[in-house]
Image (tube, rainbow, N blue to C red):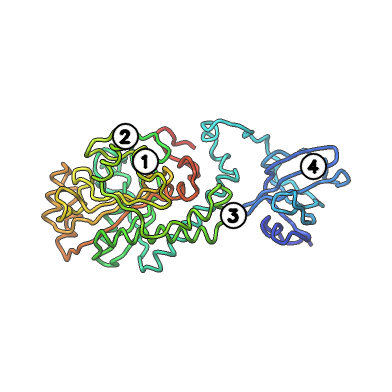
């Protein structure tokens, strides 16, 4: 009777003994004296060696990259091998030899994106997905510890939380609806029963932005809290981001180091974070010689300049009222400004969170809806929330892909998404 299957990770950890492994051929090299095969599964990569006296030597020689196989053999320590151990193969069962794999060394980014369904098998993307799984686990841990309830809002909406022309319109049984830009408005409705809520949902933005941090579809982590002001909102955000960074630095060193990120970098991400008002930022940027007019939203070069040399994020706060969304609470102590803040990650990664105190009085909300040229009928239900027992409240939205891009210090957001959706990319 054959032995049970083990994972590559188990074999590498024990470094000695007989194992039965299954997975895919990651690398393959044939010489007169041996076939050197790197076998991968979801847990790692191990080198397997077939000698000429092995009955399966010829079969092993004829395999392709990504052939699926079962290998039985003896694992022994070997410092020269990946993971510090090597398997002397005893038997080989070919599940599927397949065809020659179309991905070879030095392929173009566009080609790799066109066959993303195959290129996601790379170790780099695999490890990015594992890091993402860990990161989301820590976010959920933090919310649970803070008594914030996970909820599940809709993706079809009748209006956008942000308004404007960045909505994807969808036909809906003879009518039209939109794909959600944000779950915020629905989360605000749920605070009146659960008080503190969060959701993780896909959001869609029809922004024609060709940058290293923009997606048209992304996973949005959003939260809303009853009775909270903007100051408490910001304190929660920095504690949350710090919690995730500390956990990854402590528990996931190997993943971080694979991408060249030093765990000690993330250890420095502790509250309080840096703060700068919008007015101060514009003055600072103009002083540095960057072009920006008052009332202009800072772009990537501005965000990079503002965070240069910092080892933890910066809150950019107190924006002019006309720059931000209709639902943001005006600052009574700072006329013309709203109680809002964007969290900018250092090292040029830019905005990862946008948050604000929300307007909670009906008359002011109706006034802002008209001022922003929105259709009051689309927001009637949202205004209703201010009619029955309204309370001050605040919330935020975090782009999980942007967060991971910063945590791993990767150059492009497509590096942390299995199937990126951008202005010119919707296949496969």
Residue nearest the observer in this picture, 360 or 271: 271
Which numbered disc flags the more N-terminal residue, 2 or 1?
A: 2
Q: Where is residue 388, by image quadrant?
A: bottom left
The image position of residue 219, as x and y in percent, is 40, 49
**Local secondary structure at mark 1:** helix
* Front disc: 4 or 2: 2
Residue at the spot of label 3: 254
Marks 2/1: CA–CA distance: 9 Å
Marks 4/2: CA–CA distance: 58 Å
Which numbered disc flags the more N-terminal residue, 2 or 3?
A: 3
- Give above or below for 272 relative to 182: below
Which numbered disc flags the more N-terminal residue, 4 or 3?
A: 4
Contact, mark 1 vs mark 4 (Cβ under 8 Å): no
The image position of residue 399, as x and y in percent, is 39, 49
The image position of residue 146, as x and y in percent, is 37, 68
- Give above or below for 377 relative to 192: above
Residue nearest the observer in this picture, 8 or 156: 8
Residue at the spot of label 4: 35
Marks 2/3: CA–CA distance: 39 Å
Marks 1/4: CA–CA distance: 52 Å
Contact, mark 2 vs mark 1 (Cβ under 8 Å): yes
Residue at the spot of label 2: 290
**Local secondary structure at mark 4:** strand
Which numbered disc flags the more N-terminal residue, 3 or 1?
A: 3
The image position of residue 423, as x and y in percent, is 39, 34
Residue furthest out toward the front = 287
Residue sitting at x 41%, y 59%: 270
The quadrant in which the N terminus is found is: bottom right
Contact, mark 2 vs mark 3 (Cβ under 8 Å): no
Residue at the spot of label 1: 305
């Amino acid at each position: 009777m054959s032995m049970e299957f083990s994972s590559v990770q188990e074999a590498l950890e024990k470094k000695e003994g007989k194992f039965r492994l299954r997975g895919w051929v990651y690398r393959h090299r044939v010489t007169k004296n041996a076939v050197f095969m790197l076998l991968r599964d979801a847990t790692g990569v191990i080198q397997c060696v077939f000698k000429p006296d092995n009955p399966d030597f010829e079969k092993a020689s004829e395999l392709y990259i990504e052939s699926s196989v079962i290998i039985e053999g003896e694992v022994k320590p070997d410092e020269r091998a990946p993971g510090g151990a090597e398997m002397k193969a005893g038997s080989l069962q070919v599940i599927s030899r397949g065809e020659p794999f179309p991905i070879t060394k030095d392929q173009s980014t566009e080609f790799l994106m066109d066959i993303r369904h195959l290129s996601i098998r790379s170790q780099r993307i695999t490890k990015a997905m594992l890091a993402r799984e860990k990161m989301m686990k820590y976010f959920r841990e933090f919310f649970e510890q803070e008594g914030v309830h996970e909820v599940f809002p809709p993706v079809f909406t009748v209006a956008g939380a942000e308004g404007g022309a960045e909505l994807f319109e969808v036909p809906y049984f003879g009518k039209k609806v939109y794909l959600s830009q944000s779950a915020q408005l629905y989360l605000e409705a749920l605070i009146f029963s659960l008080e503190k809520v969060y959701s993780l949902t896909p959001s869609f933005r029809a922004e024609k932005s060709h940058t290293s941090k923009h997606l048209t579809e992304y996973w949005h982590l959003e939260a809303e809290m009853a009775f909270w002001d903007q100051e408490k909102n910001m304190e929660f955000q920095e504690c949350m981001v710090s919690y995730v960074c500390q956990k990854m630095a402590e528990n996931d060193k190997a993943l971080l180091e694979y991408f060249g990120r030093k765990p000690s970098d993330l250890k420095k991400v502790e509250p309080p974070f840096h703060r700068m008002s919008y007015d101060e930022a514009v003055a600072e940027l103009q002083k540095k010689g960057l072009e920006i007019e008052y009332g202009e939203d800072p772009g990537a070069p501005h965000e990079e300049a503002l965070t240069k040399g910092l080892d933890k994020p910066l809150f950019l706060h107190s924006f002019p009222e006309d720059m931000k969304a209709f639902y943001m609470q005006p600052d009574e102590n700072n006329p013309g400004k709203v109680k809002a803040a964007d969290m900018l990650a250092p090292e040029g990664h830019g905005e990862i969170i946008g948050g604000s105190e929300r307007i909670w009085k009906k008359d002011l909300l109706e006034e802002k809806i008209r001022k922003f040229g929105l259709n009051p009928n689309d927001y009637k239900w949202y205004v209703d929330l201010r009619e029955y027992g309204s309370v001050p409240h605040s919330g935020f939205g975090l782009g999980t892909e942007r967060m991971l891009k910063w945590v791993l210090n990767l150059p492009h957001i497509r590096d942390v998404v299995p199937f990126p959706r951008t202005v010119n990319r919707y296949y496969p």
